[in-house]
């Protein structure tokens, strides 16, 4: 499978091709989020020696799952720390990490999830297969194919609304887990194919002519894209060439690291082509997605006469003859996806005039990811998330509240409009052990029709914001420890028949003025009579007083008439 290309040489996550140059890159580092999943909750994280990158634990990004170390037999001195631990998710169908990139970056981000099983559960059980989602959009299927082979998934996409969620979904073929999760802001111009409705899933990103076991990432690549040697077998003879000189990226449109461009392959002679290929993979819905490819060229030999054609599946991909620039990056890429091929064959062949064989320095291949899944209205998603965080609701409350529909949160139902994003319609948090006051965030769920908070331990007063929920037809606050008055607007809506309002068994709740609502039923029939009698006496006296005041008022009123 094509997605395997990347996976081979990642074991030494920290090996880098060049000496660290922190100079001028510090602010980039600050915008990276590098999570080593499964580190102990109290871990301070660590700084990777080779890159100066800070890796942190995942406790602040998810509150589900369990931490594990991989099995000791897979921990070798060469194995970077990032692979030593995993977080696994034996419960829940969907478990999500929530990342908050710094606001000034974006909107385009690279997200990278990495997996190495390493027999972390000691069962060496059937290797798991599960799905990974980017927010509400299916991203890929994670097919753990070997115990000790790391798997890398990368997507480049827009992030909306300040947060992005990466969700692992149990599809019934083993327990999902994850080793590492990275987020890197990208300059928007780097991948012009990415927009609000489509992202790019990485198939391969390779540097030609690079020695085995060398990988380039940060700081060679300021965006920490990972470049690996080309490892696919090829039938033609390739020659490796390189230069010690810097390869310029004059246009700054691709920012392929100089380290990647400094090495290349050429064909053996002008009469042989450079050929390579990849097989298309089918999507979850079994159709073949579109592929986007980017080919990077730079001339490494002085005074060369090198010209060649570039063909994809036999069609000229570039209408003219390619003549790479000396020590400067040039690229050919598809803006529109090539659609529907089972296999992609790239061929570079020299023109009759060329005295040198064709050359290529780097390649990236992506498949197109539709990101058209509609998420819950942002205001509702934020409000319900605030509610979750305040009351520490666990359940399956992760990812988008309403979408995809099959993963909608328990205890919540949504209004799926034909046009426009879903909103939260009802919320049942009955008997959930909630404590503290009633969150004013409930008041932000503008489409809410039912709110059941009964049989919890809620205290404080009923917030006024609840009366602004114009669609609310049921509010059940039975069996809490609420105090103060019921907002008059709520009472009015209830009296007018628009709202079913239940508030029994809130002993200290007052419904009108300062008089507390008497409990409907005596909760304890064993209450001694000598307690009851004085209460009755007081009530009778109060009643008399009220009557007296009313009569006096009325008399005054009559006099005024
Ligand atoms: C960094 O280097 C020091 C000293 O060689 C070593 O003790 C430490 O484990 C290294 N840390 C990481 C994260 O590799
Ligand atoms: C993982 O290993 C470390 C160090 O060997 C140990 O302190 C920690 O308790 C282990 N964690 C788990 C979840 O077993
Ligand atoms: C794992 O992937 C490799 C490389 O694609 C393939 O050769 C091998 O057959 C796969 N193994 C399993 C068990 O699927
Ligand atoms: C994103 O790009 C695709 C392909 O060019 C286009 O069809 C789509 O309308 C674009 N989406 C937006 C939101 O611009
Ligand atoms: C060019 O290289 C190919 C492959 O190495 C070889 O078979 C062929 O004989 C070479 N042709 C010439 C003209 O050298
Ligand atoms: C090289 O490619 C061009 C354009 O596709 C084609 O016309 C030509 O026959 C090819 N030459 C060789 C030697 O393959
Ligand atoms: C090869 O060079 C000749 C003479 O400069 C030129 O006329 C011809 O168009 C060139 N052919 C190609 C394919 O570039
Ligand atoms: C909320 O859930 C409880 C327990 O599952 C149930 O008794 C109650 O009727 C539900 N409330 C609403 C408004 O559906
Ligand atoms: C309710 O809260 C009080 C104090 O906050 C606590 O003492 C009590 O145990 C709680 N009751 C329940 C059922 O959680
Ligand atoms: C609930 O309590 C918090 C913290 O004590 C307070 O900031 C907030 O205003 C209260 N909300 C309501 C609706 O009383």
Image (cartoon, rainbow, N blue to C red):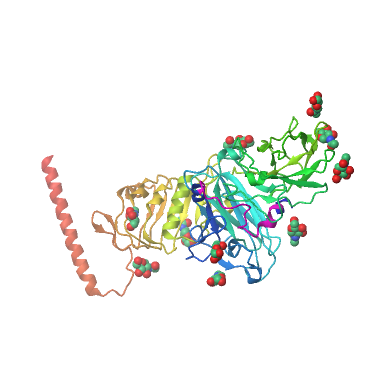
| Residue 312 to residue 427: above or below | above
Q: Residue at x 19, y 59 (%)?
A: 543
Residue 425 in picture, x, y percent from top left: 48, 49
Q: Can residue 78 be seen in this view?
A: yes
Give the quadrant of ligand 3: bottom right
Task: Tell me, yes or no, if residue 342 can be seen here.
Answer: no
Foreground residue among 232 and 289: 232
- Horizontally, residue 8 falls left or right of residue 538, namely right
Q: Position of residue 137 (x, y in %)?
A: 60, 48
Q: On screen, 317 above or below 547?
A: above
From the top left corner, tell me how far across and down residue 91 is, in percent: 57, 64
Q: In which quarter of the image is the C terminus?
A: top left
Which quadrant of the structure image shows residue 460?
Answer: bottom left
Q: Which of 213 and 86 is in front in this view?
A: 213
Q: Is residue 23 found left or right of 345 in the rendered image?
A: left
Is residue 7 covered in magenta?
yes
Q: In this view, does 305 lie above or below 275?
A: above
**On the image, which quarter does residue 76 sit in?**
bottom right
> Magenta part mainly helix, strand or loop?
loop
Residue 95 percent across, percent down from the top left: 56, 58
Q: Is residue 2 inside the magenta stretch?
A: no
Task: Tell me the residue at 56%/49% (across/down).
Answer: 135
Q: In this view, does 420 lie to the left or right of 309?
A: left
Segment tinted magenta in the rendering: 5-25
Residue in the foreground of this view, choosing between 140 and 497: 140
């Amino acid at each position: 499978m094509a997605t395997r290309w990347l996976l081979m040489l990642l074991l030494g996550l920290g090996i880098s091709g060049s000496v660290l140059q922190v100079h001028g890159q510090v602010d980039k580092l600050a915008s990276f989020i590098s999570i080593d999943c499964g580190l102990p909750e109290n871990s301070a994280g660590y700084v990777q020696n080779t890159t100066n990158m800070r890796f942190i634990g995942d406790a602040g990004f998810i509150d589900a799952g369990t931490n594990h170390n991989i099995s000791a037999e897979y921990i070798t001195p060469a194995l970077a720390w990032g692979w030593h631990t995993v977080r696994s998710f034996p419960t829940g169908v969907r478990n999500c990490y929530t990342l908050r990139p710094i606001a000034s970056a974006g909107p385009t981000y690279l997200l990278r999830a990495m997996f190495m099983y390493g027999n972390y559960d000691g069962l060496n059980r059937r290797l798991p297969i599960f799905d990974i989602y980017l927010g509400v959009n299916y991203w890929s299927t994670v097919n753990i194919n070997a115990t000790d082979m790391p798997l890398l998934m990368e997507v480049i996409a827009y992030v909306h609304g300040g947060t992005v969620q990466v969700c692992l979904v149990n599809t019934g073929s083993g327990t999902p887990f994850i080793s590492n999760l990275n987020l890197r802001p990208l300059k928007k111009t780097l991948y012009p194919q990415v927009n609000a409705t489509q992202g790019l899933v990485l198939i391969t990103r390779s540097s030609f002519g690079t020695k085995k076991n060398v990988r380039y990432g940060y700081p060679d690549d300021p965006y920490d894209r990972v470049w690996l040697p080309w490892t696919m077998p090829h039938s033609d003879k390739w020659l490796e060439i390189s230069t010690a000189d810097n390869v310029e990226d004059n246009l700054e449109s691709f920012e392929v690291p100089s380290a990647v461009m400094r090495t290349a392959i050429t064909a053996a002679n002008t009469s042989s082509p450079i050929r390579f290929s990849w097989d298309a993979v089918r999507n979850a819905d079994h159709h073949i997605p579109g592929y986007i490819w980017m080919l990077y060229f730079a001339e490494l030999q002085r005074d060369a006469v090198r010209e060649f054609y570039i063909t994809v599946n036999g069609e000229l991909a570039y209408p003219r003859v390619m003549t790479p620039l000396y020590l400067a990056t040039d690229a050919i890429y598809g803006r529109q996806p090539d659609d529907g091929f089972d296999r992609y064959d790239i061929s570079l062949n020299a023109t009759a005039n060329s005295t040198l064989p064709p050359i290529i320095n780097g390649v990236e291949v992506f498949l197109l990811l539709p990101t058209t899944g509609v998420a819950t209205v942002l205001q509702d998603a934020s409000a319900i998330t605030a509610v979750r965080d305040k009351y520490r609701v666990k359940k399956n409350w992760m990812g988008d509240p309403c979408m995809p529909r099959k993963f909608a949160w328990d205890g919540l139902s949504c209004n799926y409009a034909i046009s426009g994003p879903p909103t939260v319609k009802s919320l049942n948090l009955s008997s959930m052990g909630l404590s503290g006051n009633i969150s004013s965030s409930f008041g932000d769920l503008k489409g809410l029709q039912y709110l059941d908070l009964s049989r919890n331990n809620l205290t404080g007063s009923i917030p006024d914001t609840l009366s602004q929920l114009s669609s609310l037809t049921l509010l059940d606050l039975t069996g809490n420890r609420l105090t103060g008055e019921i907002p008059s607007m709520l009472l009015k809506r209830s009296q007018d028949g628009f709202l079913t309002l239940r508030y029994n068994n809130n002993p200290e709740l007052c419904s009108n003025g300062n008089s507390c609502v008497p409990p409907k039923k005596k909760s304890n029939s064993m209450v001694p009579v000598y307690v009851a009698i004085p209460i009755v006496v007081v009530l009778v006296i109060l009643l008399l007083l009220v009557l007296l005041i009313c009569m006096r008022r009325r008399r005054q009123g009559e006099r005024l008439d």
